[in-house]
Amino acid sequence: MSEIMTYTKKMFDPLRPDAELIDIKDIAHALSMLCRANGHFKSFYSVAQHSINCMHEAKARGCSEKIQLACLLHDASEAYLSDVTRPVKAELPRYSEIEQPLQELIWEKWLTEPLTSDEEAQVFQIDDAILAHEFINLMGEKLGDTAPLLFSLPEFTFTGFDTCKQEFIRLFYRLTKREKSVFAVGIDWMKPYWLAVELRGEEISIAKLKHISEINERYKYADAVLIDIPIGLPEDEQQAKLRPDKFARAYLKGARKSSVFNVLYRQIVYAQSSEQAWALNRELNAKMAIVSDALRPMLREVDEFLRDNPYWQNRLLESHPELTFQILNKGKGLAYSKHKAEGLEERRNILHSYGVDTATALAAFPIAKHEDVLDAISLALSAKLGCENGFVSIPTKPVSDNRGLKMQMVFGKV
């Protein structure tokens, strides 16, 4: 008996593979559970994550979607054969005789046409480039005198099994045109946690994050993440003038203008007490609003997170719900405050006009929290529209703060 039972309970014969039984769910699941380097890396790093990194590197190099898909699937045969280290594989000609036809069958099943020799060479070149940087990042060792240049920013920290599996499947569906599903996230502060809304199509998922760092695990592979918190902090009066706040106030109509506050200087954000913050406000002539002082812990949390996680710098993007709602409303100012029942209904109707059903999400929270839920949904919808239609920034040519963070508010085109 040469059959194995797969994750989806198919009886699969790796020696005589049947293309009809090859299932992307089996491949994604198995590769997310297999560790690279035969388990010798300092932390778990799966074959699936390696494959995802290869796909993103192909995309960053401007390779065709065909090559991107080939990169994603280049180790798919290991889902049925497991991995064998290169020195041992070289001594096992029979293994190669089994592996190569199986890998080619997988490519044949999903690629539009066979890889040319040049295309196959590009796939293996990308594979080797990612491998070299895996050893640098996960072992602190170089495989050669110089590391190959990367065009992407691979993620080498641990990614959860299910997160990795789902991302592998999502990328597969996108590249094979089986399903166009944008993974968009909107985040708003809802005391005492961050409220994160994930939007895939019209389906809404909500998570309560105790710390903003949880996006590392949950939303690492999101297409776009918008958050209602200032990012890109000024440190003097000149930088403050370059922040998007005054531009946003100029765009907003009516009473909604007052929802955009002057952003705190970074020195004030890191003040050890409210008293020290107000003293610095006077000293720096920073024009801090009373409500801004209450936001200092959240501002500091996000600023520290971005300082310590370069991957998220200028990926986690600032937006503003009042801004997004007006844009979603075709530029028309909203008639009612979100603190009133009429305002909540007005915002629900705007979201519904884009096919987003808010009923289930709102039912999970008391009415007093509905404004925050709707704000987070609006950010997720704006992120989704941005992925589909492009993003616009306020101001149109943002400058960066002293840490390289763009001082901007971002929203999706409608």
Image: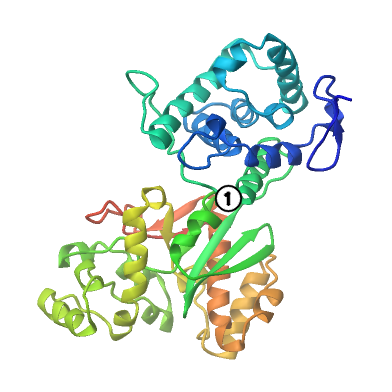
Q: Quadrant of residue 208?
A: bottom right
Q: How many labels does the image show?
A: 1
In the rendered view of the protein, which quadrant contains the C terminus?
bottom right
- Furthest residue toward bottom: 340
Q: Between residue 26 and residue 173, name the one nearer to us.
A: 26
Q: For residue 117, what is the image quadrant?
A: top right
Please, what is the three-letter code of the amino acid marked with disc 1?
Answer: Gly
Residue 231 seen from this side: no
Rendered residue at 79%/36% (across/down): 23
* Residue 402 horizontal/vertical position (percent): 22, 55
Please give the residue where the numbered disc 1 appears in the rendered image.
Answer: 160
**Residue in view at x 45 percent, y 39 percent:** 42
- Against 252, residue 227 (above or below) is above
> Mark 1 packing: few (<14 Cα in 10 Å), some, or many (20+)?
some
Q: Quick check: 111 left or right of 402? A: right
* The N terminus: image quadrant: top right
- In the image, what residue occupies the spot 55% across and 57% down? 218
Q: Which of 311 and 47 is in front in this view?
A: 47
Left or right for 142, reference 22: left
Please tell me which residue is depicted at 70% across the width and 42% down the height of the picture: 29
Give the image location of residue 74, x and y in percent. Answer: 63, 26
Give the image's coloring scheme: rainbow
Q: Which of 359 and 24 is in front in this view?
A: 24
Examine the rendering and report whether any part of residue 353 can be seen: yes
Question: In front: 46, or 271?
Answer: 46
Q: Is residue 125 above or below residue 208?
A: above
| Corner quadrant of residue 249 | bottom left
Q: Where is residue 394 in the image (x, y as percent from the top left)?
A: 37, 60
x and y, in percent, of residue 126 in the image: 50, 24
Task: Classify mark 1: helix, strand or loop.
Answer: loop
Q: In this view, does 8 lie above or below 282?
A: above
